Amino acid sequence: MTSSLHDASPTAAVPVGQPAPDDRPLAANRPRRRLHPYAFALPSIALVLVFFVLPFLANAFFAFVQWTGYSDTITWTGLTNFKLLNQLGILKHAITVTAVYAITAMAVQNTVGLALATALQRSNRVNSLFRSLFFIPVLISPLAAGYIWAAVLNAHGPLNAFLSAVLPGEFHYAWLGHDTTALLAVASIDAWKLSGLITLVYIAGLNRIPEQLLQAATLDGAGAVRRFWSVKLPLLAPAVTFNVVVSLVGAFSALDVVFSTTAGGPGDATTLLNVAVYTQYGQSFFGTASALGFVVTLMVIVTAVPLMSWLRRREVPM
Amino acid sequence: MNGYRRRHGLLVGALVIGLTASACANGDDSAQSGKVADTSGKAPTGVTLTLWHNTADPTALLDLYKAYERKSGNTIDLVDIPADSFPSTVQTKWATGARPDILEWHGNQVDVLSLNAAKNMIDLSALPFVKKEGTLADVSGNVGGKVYAATVGSLSVDGIFYNKQVFTEAGLQPPQTYAELAADCKTLKAKTPGVTPIFEAGGSQWPPQILSAFDYLAESNTDQAYNRSILDGTAQLNDPNGPFVAGLKAYDSLRKAGCFNSDANTAKWEDSFKAVLSGKAAMVANNSDSIGLLNSDADNDTAKVDAAVGFVGLSATKPVTNYAPSPLGTYYVPSTGDSKKERAAVDFIDYITGAGYADYIKEAKIIPTLSGTATPQLQGLLQDVKSAYDKGATLSFNSPLPGFSSFGAEAQKLLAGQETPQQVADKMQTYYTQAAAAAKQ
Amino acid sequence: MSAIALKTRGVVRYACLTLFAIPWILVPFWLLIVNSLKTQGDASVLSMSWPEHWSAGANYHTVIDKGSYLTGLRNSALLAVPTILAVLLLGSMAAWAYARSDSRALRFAYYTSALSIVLPPAIIPTIYVLTQLGLNGSRLGYMLVIAGTRLGVVIFLATGFVRTLPHDFEEAAQLDGANKWQIYWRIVLPVLTPVLFTGAVMLIISVWNDFYFALFLLRGSQSATLPLTLYSFASSSTHGVSWNLVFAHVVLTSLPLVLVYLVLQRRVLAGLTEGGVTG
């Protein structure tokens, strides 16, 4: 945990490192040294266990069985589901699509978020207005965001109207109708939705960077860009960690946006892993659906966990 | 890693296995397999029946539910299943053991099997509507000779919608074979250059299937000959000389000849009908369910639609239409173990196919699927559909074939020129084989 | 830097921001609102123009009437509020326990809870669990599942925060003879407020807009939440999408959170920018 950075926050109620008062009673006379409020965790443990862990493990089990709506029998089949999904190209394709989606969303969100944060770092009325404005997309549901942007990106929608006006000739490109652009578009819609939040997190991170460090850098002759890359960015690491994890998790659990824009199409261009799971459900193939869900889980563990620890290590303690 | 974790893991593992085992066991004894519809005694009143229904239900169906409520004194609790993800949502809910008292669902055999009807649905074969459905009862909601569904919604009939004025201008008769289709396309390009000969809506995922396969194979599927051959293995979808490949090839050559609209890959189903209504397109291959769209495009001036658009059946070498039972208006009665509700649900089936049927048909203005009810005054276009159907109609060959839900995406790829006809056929054969294996168990 | 240069930079910055805000915010939301006021035919053109033929009243009326808006609103509120409060309470309690203990068991529980943030939900087994408990399809079942899968966020944020507090932080109260509950309620909880506020904001947005769980766990159209009513409504036509109606529904569905936000704007932004997200 980044306890060190936290100390500078105005919200910390107790200053750290204050020397203990001299009239502290002798160790022997002290009542219990530490509190162990174990029981306080019980309700939470119960809920997480029953409603997260249990289904999660059961899903892992169902990934290795033959289970469809056609019959009530569930039989163990080992890796058959995965082999099937691989043979049909579903697995590989869904992984590729999800990876592209995740990277695009991460890139857009963090670029826009960081840029806006740098521009809106100071707290004045105009900046607050802008921060507020950019936060609105965070509030609406992903479904709603999908419907809105499906309209904006429509072949006869405002984006193309604008492009027709500035470019020679009529521009009626169907953004959501072609493989690559559909995927990039859907990922960007997701990014659009979250950018406002990412901006605020980066602002928080930027505000934590002590002025002295920046002033020292300026005195050393560092220009604005240099200051940004060598001083601000490393110290922003916790914010980056948070934002990258949020983007990644968002991409892996994305479903709503796809539902309201492309439904997995055109063809299977936007069939993310979760959408592919849903498609398997739609054919009554629950074993393979669980197998795909299992793959999502593995992918998240394999990418998010090392990424998080790598990012944590890069956080510069102060 | 350490003792705690291992113990934790074992405990949770045991819980999971126990849970799954009991869940599976529960699945077995809660439903009573092979149950036959109970029509004895008077139907109960004051019962609340849950009905999973498609949100795309036309008003006539919604009014039918209300009419039943009034007549029977029972209440229908409608559970909305969004149309866009209808099969996925129903099947997922179903997999969890949830059962409505009445289920609105597809009538295709593969869809009946996917819910394991033999075990989970009540056999309605003895009810009076089955005779009224005639041959429809053999293909809709039918598994193993037993009828599990009542179909009151109009059949979805595939064919070609054409713009009458464009055809008159070009001096053409509507096509009856694919050869004529190709020839017409050529003529149209010469005589009416501003008009798209055939408008394909690749952006909507399902329409390209119609011209590339369903229509072409209609004549091969008399008495379900073709799909039976696939099911029993005597033929394969990807037989290079088989009709499936031939149909895909015919479609591909239409594409190469420039018969399709330039934005075929991204145009939507709604666009295709606006085009054929206005005359920007000469033909659209689609089904009779779309007539409602045409009407609303013309602000419900059905006379205008009838004057502008006609309908014909088309297949490889003969004017044969193909049809499938619509998911809208096909109802099943799941076994819930609650005999009172089951009795009331059967009563619902009786009503919608009996006492309430005539008023429903009058309001819906569709071709009745049950005999014994006069066909109402249909709009001209629907009359065209009826005559095309009467001329020749077979069941859409994909109706009982598992794995065909993936065909939409493949047809799109063919349209986009991303795959060759043989490649598509090979893929569909793979999909079919895998799905059939999974379905057989 | 001279005052004029600073001012110019400021002006340039605001000009750029405004230019960026136009396509980023103004265009989509203007399109949304303006087309929700038009007739179906006009709206299907998807232009940014001001409505020629007003259909605002009819559109919004249809949404409220046929789009089950009020039901959705009522259910969303009934389900979201207690769930969020429960998650904040139980999560912060657990965070205190995790932060203050050396027990391996609790450390394992903490990591599991944190992991639940990133791992996707498994819907069918979840429903099996609910069925075993006799809660399938019920509102309580839905709330428990949401709580179980969202606790991770609060626990993660709050535990980190509590760990930064010195160990003898609660000691003074302990010496005074307060019991654990009093210590938690009077000492720990108030200190956690900024972190919980951040958590609450994220929870509200995610729980209020939840679609996936609601689709499978809520039975009957009487229990539908706002995202569900929107989705059902938007996919209900065999005649293709009526943009004017869909947009009207989107406006009404987004309205509650946006209104709450506008009222609490300053606090929300302050909480997030100064808050304990990254601390």
Image (cartoon, helix red, strand yellow):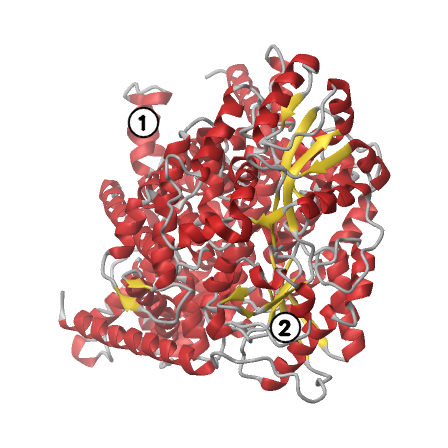
Residue B318, position as x, y percentages in the image? 60, 37
Q: Indicate whether A292 appears above or below A154.
A: below
Q: Given the image, what chain letter belongs to the residue carrying mark 2?
A: B
Q: Whole-percent x and y of residue B110?
A: 48, 58
Q: Position of residue B15 (x, y in %)?
A: 29, 77
Residue at numbered disc 1: A229
Image coords of residue A42 (percent x, y): 35, 76
Q: What kind of residue is marked 2?
A: Thr
Q: Quadrant of residue B317?
A: top right
Outermost residue, top side: A168
The residue drawn where x is 78% and y is 45% is B383
**Quadrant (top left/top right/bottom left/bottom right) for the C terminus of chain A:** top left
Q: Quadrant of residue A205?
A: top left
Q: Residue at x 73, y 47 (%)?
A: B386
Instruction: Identify residue type, mark 1.
Output: Trp
Q: Which mark is residue B50?
A: 2
